[in-house]
Amino acid sequence: MMADRPQTRPGTDYRGRTRVSQVTGPLSPQQSLESQESTGPPLSTQLKEKLRKSYHAFASGEQEWKTVYHPSCSSVFAGAGPNLSRFPKGFQEFWAVFDVLVEVALEEVVTSRNINIVAWDDGHAFVTSKHRFTSVTGDSWEGSVLNRMKYNQEGLIVDQALFVENLARMEAFVGGLFAYSAVTQLLKERRLVLRNSP
């Protein structure tokens, strides 16, 4: 019998954040690397520090995740096909749909952080993490996700793209989740509208 919420294990949640219960201090050098190369104009030391603090507050779970996004931010799966491209582009709707899948269609979510790569000179932060999702029907997807976030000078995320390993398998997996009746019903109840397939 399915639990009310999927089981999770220590690591990060599916947004790439460290689970709050696992935060014991600043990210270690193994967890956060500063990129020394950038294609954009150099930022001031003060602005770099502002972006760094904003990112670390988000990644460590110290800050409510919605507060670090600019209202117009778009979130997408890069290279998405007919199923992943159905997620809404607005960040709030994108993650609301993902939350529905987690809430009623996934039995287990296992995540772990790999590494952060931060390139503050052009406002980019990259988080790689490994995941395994198992649905209530026993279907599963496993692989790494690269979460690329672009920050503005106020320290807010203005653009987000998720690059998924085993993309074809993820496409099929998500297609099965969208076909699950409980997902359809909850999306309707929460007035969340999927985009049309290309």
Image (cartoon, rainbow, N blue to C red):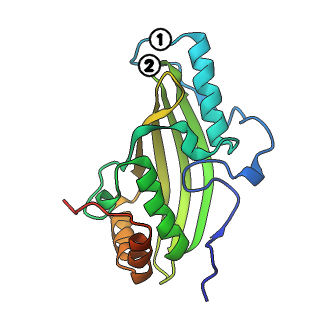
Residue 191 picture location, percent across and down: 39, 66
Residue farthest bottom in this picture: 1
**Which residue is identified by label 2?**
38
The span from disc 1 to disc 2 (Cα, nearest Å) is 8 Å
Residue 179 picture location, percent across and down: 34, 78
Label 1 or label 2, whichever lies nearer to me, is: 1
**Which residue is identified by label 1?**
42
Judged from the image, the secondary structure of the residue bearing numbered disc 2 is: loop
**How many numbered marks have been drawn onto this rendered protein structure?**
2
The reply to whether residue 64 is in sight is yes
x 30%, y 61%: residue:
86
**Is residue 168 positioned above or below 112 on the image?**
below
Say what amino acid the circle numbered 1 marks. Answer: Pro
x 55%, y 33%: residue:
117
Please report contact status of discs 1 and 2: CB closer than 8 Å, yes or no. Answer: yes
- 45 or 32, which is in the foreground? 45
**Position of 179 compared to 25: left or right?**
left
**Is residue 153 positioned above or below 117 on the image?**
above
**Is residue 29 positioned above or below 77 on the image?**
above
Residue farthest right in this picture: 24
Residue 151 picture location, percent across and down: 48, 29
x 63%, y 41%: residue:
59
Residue 23 picture location, percent across and down: 76, 46
**Is residue 38 positioned above or below 85 on the image?**
above
x 52%, y 76%: residue:
104
Q: Residues within 10 Å of mark 2 (few under 14, many from 20)?
A: few
Quadrant position of the C terminus in the picture? bottom left
Quadrant position of the N terminus in the picture? bottom right
- Disc sitting over residue 113 in the figure: none
- 92 or 16, which is in the foreground? 92
**Position of 34 compared to 177: left or right?**
right
Say what amino acid the circle numbered 2 marks. Answer: Ser
